[in-house]
Image (cartoon, helix red, strand yellow):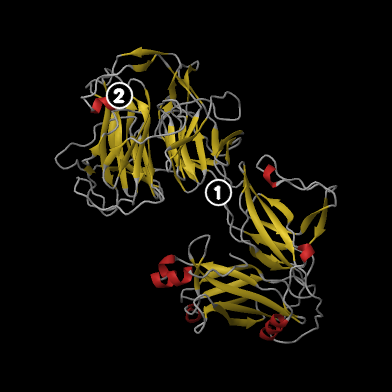
Amino acid sequence: MMDVSVGNTQLKWCKVAHTTGPTPKPRHGHRAVSIKDLMIVFGGGNEGIVDELHVLNTSTNQWFMPDVKGDIPPGCAAYGFACDGTRLLVFGGMIEYGRYSNDLYELQSANWEWRHIRPKAPKNDVAPCPRLGHSFTMIGSQVFLFGGLANDSEDPKDNIPRYLNDLFILDTRPGQPVMQWERPQCTGTPPTPRESHTAVAYIPKDSTTITDSNNGCTNGNSIPGAKLIIYGGMAGCRLDDIHILDLGTMTWSSPNITGPPPLPRSLHSASMIGNRMYIFGGWVPYHEAIESKDWCPSAIENDPNQPPTTIVHEKEWRCTNTMGVLDLETMTWVYTTQETDNDTAPKARAGHCAVPISTRLYIWSGRDGYKKAANKNQVCYNDLWYLETEPPSPPSKPALIRANVKTLEVYWNQLQNADFYMLQVMLYELQPTTVAPSNSSGDEASQQAEKRPKLEIRPEKDVWYYAGIFTNNHGVVSNLWIPKPGSELIDEKMIDTKNPPKFQENNYEKTELEHGTLYKLRICGVNACGLGPWSEEAHFKTCVPGFPGAPSAIKITKNPDGGISLSWQEPPDAEILDYSVYLAVKRPTATSNAIGFVKCYTGRKNACTIPESQLSQAHNQIDPVNQKPSILFRLAARNSLGTGAATQIKWLQDIKRFSDETKTSSSNHQEPACCSL
């Protein structure tokens, strides 16, 4: 693990030591895109160019090879790879030495089916020529093709290279009869011809609405304020220039950049995380160079009035593992790393793939410079790394799965960039109460419970205590760790993936949860960058001995008539008299944020049916984790002592069921959930 600093954040490289599944062979010239937590790798090669598709689930570190079908494209390298939701696009690349492609293929990840697409040429122009080393960048529903390297020889074995700086746009919105390339009319000074450069999409936070202009470019589906950023590349020498295309005006510009820049490079990777562009690896020039009057692409090519200038021409090149981080809001290189040859960072490489997933930057494979193996193939790496760029975001508010006499089983949403979670508990104090046997109904018992004195925080107990470390997004809380007098407390600034806290018996007193007691709980995620923010606090109470526990293992099944069937597991050793099921409904006379619960079942059986007529009265709220409408239920059991703790569940709905009005009103209310199944 290697530490580097960007602002107040420590960036850290982490090597994925173990993966499962069919690991792809090491290669270079491949590309990768992401769909949620999946890294999808296609093409490239070393012992010949391959047409394999490999997918890495970064949540489980498992590789798999989808069973693809349809118009499977030939193997290609140095091609363009873009992702539009769950649809992937592949354009161009090298099919074999000297033979390049200008074919376009679409892959639907829903069924892993390939389709050969044949877009029309632009109006009054020709389609993009075959090429490699171009950029292919998705912005909204438009993909931007720029530059690359063409072969002007009719004989693939007789390579006549030609660097390109042409720009094409392809509108990929579904429903079009035929896709068509567009050759936009741009103003300003464009980038010089180049290949093996990178391009990223950038949308400033303070962007304004784009209006269509009469410049030959259709911006009807453009994202407000979007920009295309071109960096580096190769055209006789390595480049380090930056060019910006404003998609609102279709104007090229070269910004003033501050801060120490990284070395010029090609065959590198560029990835956007937040407002920062992360440049890694590639070919860079050796420090030795000669002055030359030979032509090398620069701004002078587009300004013939400027006299030629003496340039630095490279004698030879090498791979690098240096990194540069450019803040696109301030146009400042906020960090550049030095070369390292230890095991705390990926080795120097070029032609690798890089893809951001959440706030992590994943790097896989690539070639090791000029090194050749015994079989005369390039030496390629087979390692997988990710760069941790920031601590985890706060998890969702902890929710209760089940409460028992001395345990609380809780869960929270899974964070993509958390290695483990830390849970803290704060103790509440109950005022003494005498519980007498009761034969009252569930409603009467609930009313009596509401009349009991409210709980207050004990000032001396107003302290958060660690309750455990969890690798999954759920756990059973059975105890808390109280520091012994004079013991050294845990320094939260020192906690990260490699340094989880240790609750030693000689420094901490392990204390069990008390029955019939209310606790506060909060959770935070931890990764190599340290602790993330704590979640919103939740309040849960352990059960009182003798009272029935909360129903668990709740299942909901849709019925053909539109109703549902509920079933649940009986609490152990409770001699249940009956169960009650409540449905959350909107209070007709209350404020827009108020809901109430109406009883929809009372009976001895641990199952019931709720008709569609009752479900239609339910209050629908938007679940903050899944962003789907949900219906709330509460289930409680009653014995001779009274009604025990209730289990609250969320039944997630298909968002299409509800109108925009329903979704709007629901999203304004977020009732704390005790359980979501």
Q: Secondary structure at mark 1?
A: loop
Give the residue at x 49% y 83%.
588
Q: Which residue is mark 1?
A: 416
In the rendered view, tell whether residue 642 sits above or below residue 131. Answer: below
Give the residue at x 65% y 64%.
538
Q: Is residue 41 visible?
A: no
Residue 152 in which image quadrant: top left
Dot 2 alpha-carbon crowd within 10 angstroms: few under 14, some 14 to 19, many 20 or more: some
Marks 1/2 in contact by CB < 8 Å: the verdict is: no
Image position, residue 444 (x, y; %): 69, 86
* Of 306 and 179, the residue lying toward us: 306
Give the residue at x 21% y 41%.
185
> Which quadrant: the C terminus?
bottom right
Mark 2: amino acid: Pro
Mark 1: amino acid: Gln
> As drawn, is 608 to the left or to the right of 289?
right
* Of 341 and 601, the residue lying toward us: 341
Image position, residue 132 (x, y; %): 32, 29
Q: Which residue is mark 2?
A: 297
What's the CA distance linking mark 1 and mark 2?
Answer: 42 Å
